[in-house]
Amino acid sequence: METKTIYIAGLGLIGGSLALGIKRDHPDYEVLGYNRSDKSRNIALERGLVDEATANFAEFAPRADVIILAVPIKQTIAFIRALADMPLKDNVIITDAGSTKAEIVAAAETYLDPSQVQFVGSHPMAGSHKSGAIAADVNLFENAYYIFTPTSLTRETTIPQMKEILTGLHARFVQIDAAEHDRVTGQVSHFPHILAASLMEQAGAYAKDHELTNRFAAGGFRDMTRIAESEPGMWTSILLSNKQAVLDRIADFQGHLDSVADLIEADDADGIWHFFNQARLTRKTMEIHKKGGIDSGFDLYVTIPDQEDSILKVLEILRGISVMNIRINEENREDINGILQITLKNQKDQARAMDLLAKDPNYNVTL
Ligand code: NAD
């Protein structure tokens, strides 16, 4: 198979993980890296993420068959602009990893020459709170959506070639229009980050006069606000790069809050019940029930006492059965039982695990 030179600019969490994923299926490819800081550049070399690394973006660009920009959105646009004036290989594929797409796609269409280069927008939809080359993980994109947003510089062969280069990511490739990408991620990703941070802001202010707030905040509050710990710089640039979609979701949500307030004001118990029930039904139809691509349809819920080795004892009972995922759902009080959510591989394993645990009087098991 033809070997290629891949140039990744930005050896952070995303760039570093892409490098590892590409090398997994294409160990013969030459992977070059750019990174501004010495730290991630040195780590990338030490960990073997890249074969060579530079602090000068222009240095490796002419050698590349594929250039992947995995830097913040503003810098991605600046690099697209800079690439327009660099001597590049004919028909080089340029792509990115930015969390928003319309602005980046517009920059590529404005600055790059379609007769010389190919460009397709990309958004690998996985991440974590970690950053830098130290956090690079070959499995980061496993079962995650990897979105391509075509542009006027995307040829018929561009996306198939990229898919081939990225097979080692084990991601699920999807292709959509950049503006639609930004609208949908505005709803399911960007707006929830605003909500989580607002909830923290509200609770933080409230805690000043109500000191029990911090103590009473339990599992539900934690689940709702986990993403409030995300990196502020990245989220600032995401919101500013997807202004219209985000403002639209904020305005829409204000309407939703007002409707609930009206129901409560009117003592409309039926209306409130339907509000919660509809939310529950809608959530059940969403893919969030599949964690990391694992279908959570074969779950067991085990009530366990808050004691030493509780989880180990449950797993001991399940010895020999393949447990796909395990999660503790804490109740409101820490001194009473917690619920262990165990995901099994199939219905047969689920039934066997249920049988084994039900025999033990220490556990209360439900499907
Ligand atoms: P990161 O902080 O781990 O890495 C960012 C990289 O960009 C670093 O190598 C840093 O040195 C470099 N960089 C930052 N500012 C720069 C500048 N002004 N000039 C040159 N280099 C600069 O971040 P990451 O999570 O890898 O994010 C990279 C891109 O991937 C961003 O566009 C982000 O929107 C996107 N993305 C992030 C996630 C996530 O959850 N982390 C998920 C999908 C996409």
Image (tube, grey):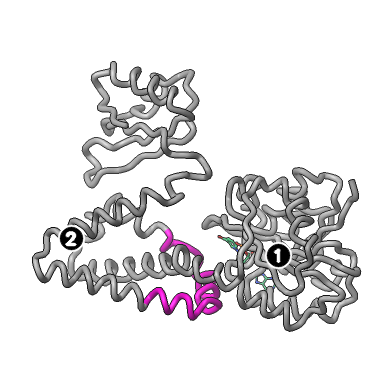
Query: In the picture, which quadrant includes the C terminus?
Result: top left
Q: Which mark is residue 10?
A: 1
* First reached walking from the N terminus: tag 2 or tag 1: 1
Magenta-colored segment: predominant secondary structure:
helix
Q: Nearer the viewer, residue 276 or 16?
A: 276
Q: Position of residue 342 (x, y in %)?
A: 40, 33
For image coordinates 73% across by 79% down, the residue present is: 109
Figure check: 300 above or below 22: above
Callout 2 crowding tier (Cα within 10 Å): few <14, some 14–19, many ≥20: some
The quadrant of the picture showing ligand 1 is: bottom right
Q: Quick check: is the Cβ at mark 1 less than 8 Å away from ligand 1?
A: yes
User: Which residue of the protein is positioned furthest toward the front in this rendering?
Assistant: 156
Q: Is residue 254 magenta?
A: no
Mark 1 crowdedness (10 Å alpha carbons): few <14, some 14-19, many ≥20: many
User: If the image is split into quadrants, where does the N terminus sit?
Assistant: top right
Q: Is residue 293 visible?
A: yes
Q: Position of residue 62 (x, y in %)?
A: 89, 69
Specify the segment rendered in magenta.
227-250
Q: Which residue is mark 2?
A: 272
- Give the residue drawn at x 26%, y 31%: 305
Residue 258, image quadrant: bottom left
| Of 224 and 123, the residue lying toward us | 123
Check the image and report above or below for 258 versus 308.
Answer: below
Give the residue displayed 34% in from the left and 58% down from the top.
Answer: 224
Report x, y in % for residue 231: 51, 65
Q: Amino acid at mark 1?
A: Gly
